[in-house]
Structures are given as C-alpha cells and as structure tokens.
Image (spheres, rainbow, N blue to C red):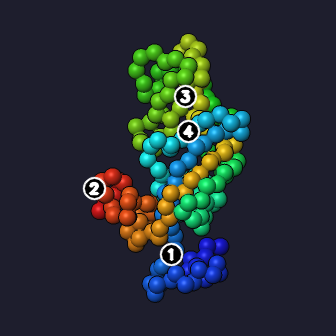
Amino acid sequence: MRDVFGLASGRGGRVTGSLFMSNRNVVTFHYTLRDLQGRLLDTSSGGQAVSYLEGAGQIIEGLDEALKDVAAGVKQTVNVPAAKAYGDYDAEQVQRVLKSLLPVEGDLQPGDQFRAGEDQFAPIVKVVEVDGDHVVLDANHPLAGVDLVFEVEVVAVREANAEELEHGHAHQGEGECGSGQCGCKS
Ligand code: ZN
C-alpha cells in the first residue's frame, strides 16, 4: 500500500501541512546499462543525466522500485529481471503478414524497423525475414526477455513540486515547466 502521507515510514516530519503533500521525489541520475553477459546496451555517460518522478512510470518499473528513497551521491548496481524491465519475450508478437498490408513503401530488409501504425504510440516492429509477398515481423521491444544490470549514480534528489505531481512527470532543473520541453500543455 502506498504510504501517501509518509507516516508509516517515519517521514512524517516532512509533511508541511498540505493535505496533498505526497513526499514523492524527482531523482536525477546517470546510468550505464548492461546485460548479464556484461555487454554495454546504453549509457547516459557523456550526455545528459535522466530525471524522473518517482512512481510515475517514467523509467522501468524495477529501477523505479530499487531507487525508491535513494539519496543524492549514491552509486548502486541494480539488477532488473526482464519482467520488470521491458517484459518477457512474447512469441505471439512475431507474425507473418502480407507485405502489401504494411504502411511502408519500397523494399524491406531483415533488420528494418518501422512504426506499425500512424499513432505515435503504435509499436515499433522489426523485420525478421522477407519471404516473397510476406514478411515476418517482431513487435517485441528490442530488450524484451533481457535481464538488465544498471550501474546508477544518483546526481540529485529533490521533492517534486505541485505542478510535476499534477503532470505526472519530472521537469528540468528546479522543476519549472520548460517552454514545451516536457510536452506540457500549460
Ligand atoms: Zn509537465
């Protein structure tokens, strides 16, 4: 159960009088992501650190859980099983379809990727095989079924402000909603 007022965790001292005080933090961190074999998959090193609002689904579930109540300066290795990362590999997400039904022009090659629909949230599918009039497509996330190892360095932790809680995501810097940077309406 969510400890909305921070009482059960002994953090009641942070309640400032607002009934809607949430004690949710915005965490900023650098990460290096590897698989269990130690292969480098991704890193924020040399780029911008990642900021997210705790518990808002902005980062993968297993990492969000592991970093709950983390403090600035912490360096931590976090193992996240596939089920709590990009999901288990689902063989039913691999389908053989008629090429003429696809929203793409021109020749397709194995390894090509495209969005399966007009919608910006339509899944990205990968061409596994081309066979005459048909192609075999895989709609699994590229990291589906992969157990992940994150090396995390927490750069900053601050309380989320009311606007961030309302929007359900972190804002840059001190939490001002940037000019369209986060895609906010306000
Ligand atoms: Zn926003």
Q: Alpha carbon of mark 4 to alpha carbon of mark 2: how far?
A: 28 Å
Q: Nearer the viewer, residue 160 or 139?
A: 160
Q: Residues within 10 Å of mark 1 (few under 14, many from 20)?
A: some
Q: Which quadrant is home to the C terminus?
A: bottom left
**Is residue 15 placed above or below 136 in the rendered structure?**
below
| Disc 2 secondary structure class | loop
Q: For mark 4, what is the residue?
A: 42
Q: Position of residue 89 (x, y in %)?
A: 68, 38
Name the kind of residue labelled 1 in the image: Ser
Amino acid type of disc 2? Ser
Looking at the picture, which amino acid does disc 4 mark? Answer: Asp
Determine which of the numbered discs, if any, sits on residue 59 in the image.
Answer: none
Q: Position of residue 126 (x, y in %)?
A: 55, 28
Q: What distance separates the C-alpha of mark 2 from that of mark 1?
A: 26 Å
Where residue 111 appears, x then y in whole percent? 55, 22
Q: Tag 1, which secondary structure? A: loop
Q: CA distance from mark 3 to mark 4?
A: 19 Å
Query: Given this view, does label 4 or label 2 mark the residue nearer the observer?
Result: 4
Residue bearing the label numbered 2: 179
